[in-house]
Amino acid sequence: MPSGMTVLVYTVIFLALAFDFINGFHDTANSIATTVSTRVLAPRVAIIMAASLNFVGALMSEKVATTIAKGIVIGTIEQYVIASALIAAIIWNLITWYLAIPSSSSHALIGGLIGASIASVGRLDIVSWKGVLDKVIIPLFSSPLLGFVIGYFVMSLLYQLLRKLTPRVIDRIASKLQIFSAAFMAFSHGSNDAQKSMGIITLALVSAGVYQGGGIPTWVKLLCAISMALGTSIGGWRIIKTMGVNMIKLAPINGFAAETSAAVVIETMSYFGAPVSTTQVISTAIMGVGASKRLSAVRWALAKNIVGTWLLTLPLTAALGALVSIIFGALI
């Protein structure tokens, strides 16, 4: 770590790693819910695999981290503002985890950062609204839609390709394929989600004047990758049940289609540096897979509640981030 860091900077780093850890167990369901619910892998084995590949994926790129560090807020901001954003995101993650609702950790963090930043200066121009539109709002709507559409067509194609095989043979083939698709999903989750904390820590270091580099420090990458892997190893059983059991009844071939479709979308968004919600993408991919069989296969009442939570995440976490920032600003 660089020298000259203040207590506030260390506090931000601690909060960012805590957010990463919580993100790990909150979003464990993203990569293994379908694998566990279809009984392809035992829960413990699935979690170990997810944690390992989350770690590897987190080290593979820094485009999303750069978006968080440079593409949301214009100029530098105070450390307490960054801390406020993290606290807002952590609170939201814990609330939605307790309620077993698969919400977006990514948009919770971005919403908190936007609200805290605006509250700290009392102006809207501190936010790069074009960056928010291009990298957050558009992917917010396009990535879940792509997850649904690709999941629908992949599953429809598999129905056609495998229609002459017996269900038993299909299950045996798909059980093996689903291990690889779950691994791909875990890797893509790490490559997108862990980078949010990398970006927020780098933003704090730049704002404090202790780092002027052009990329993400290696030690930041390692700490965030480890934190997410540890969080993933704890497991998020409440949300796993919501996604893998309550939304639709899954067979191994359905799990393979959903995981593969979601991972392709997430990796594409990561390539363009868009901090998307892996939760949203895998959820809609599962919905698309279910809808390809028949629309009634999806429990649409549950899906409606999940979508409602997605739409509320940005404005509510922005308000929460603003409130925490105002309180901190008054105390400091």
Image: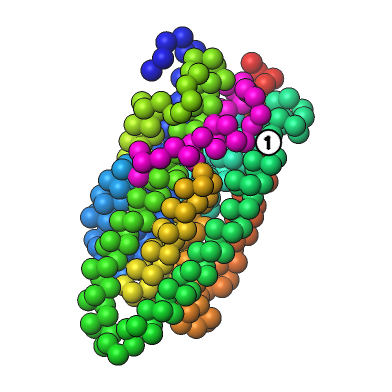
Query: Nearest the camera: 173 or 214?
Result: 214
191 in relation to 177, above or below = above
Across and down, in percent, residue 229 comes to 33, 42
Across and down, in percent, residue 261 comes to 43, 64
31 in relation to 114, above or below = below
The image quarter containing residue 20 is top left
261 in relation to 84, above or below = below
Bounds of the magenta segment: 57-83
Q: Quadrant of the C terminus?
A: top right
Q: Is residue 21 left or right of residue 166?
A: right
- Residue at 50%, 18% (x, y): give it: 212
- Residue at 27%, 56% (x, y): give it: 46
- Residue at 67%, 21% (x, y): give it: 329
Question: Farthest residue in the bottom direction?
Answer: 164
- What type is the residue that disc 1 sits on? Ser
Please say which color scheme the image uses: rainbow
- Residue at 41%, 14% (x, y): give it: 2
Q: Residue 279: in sight, yes or no?
A: yes
Residue of label 1: 128
Question: Farthest residue in the right direction?
Answer: 123
Is residue 298 highlighted in magenta? no
Label 1 environment density (alpha carbons within 10 Å; few <14, some 14–19, many ≥20): some
Number of numbered discs: 1
The image quarter containing residue 56 is top left
Q: Residue 24: in sight, yes or no?
A: no
Q: Secondary structure at mark 1?
A: loop
Across and down, in percent, residue 165 comes to 27, 87
Across and down, in percent, residue 302 comes to 54, 68
Q: Is residue 52 left or right of residue 71?
A: left
Query: Nearest the camera: 91 or 29?
Result: 29
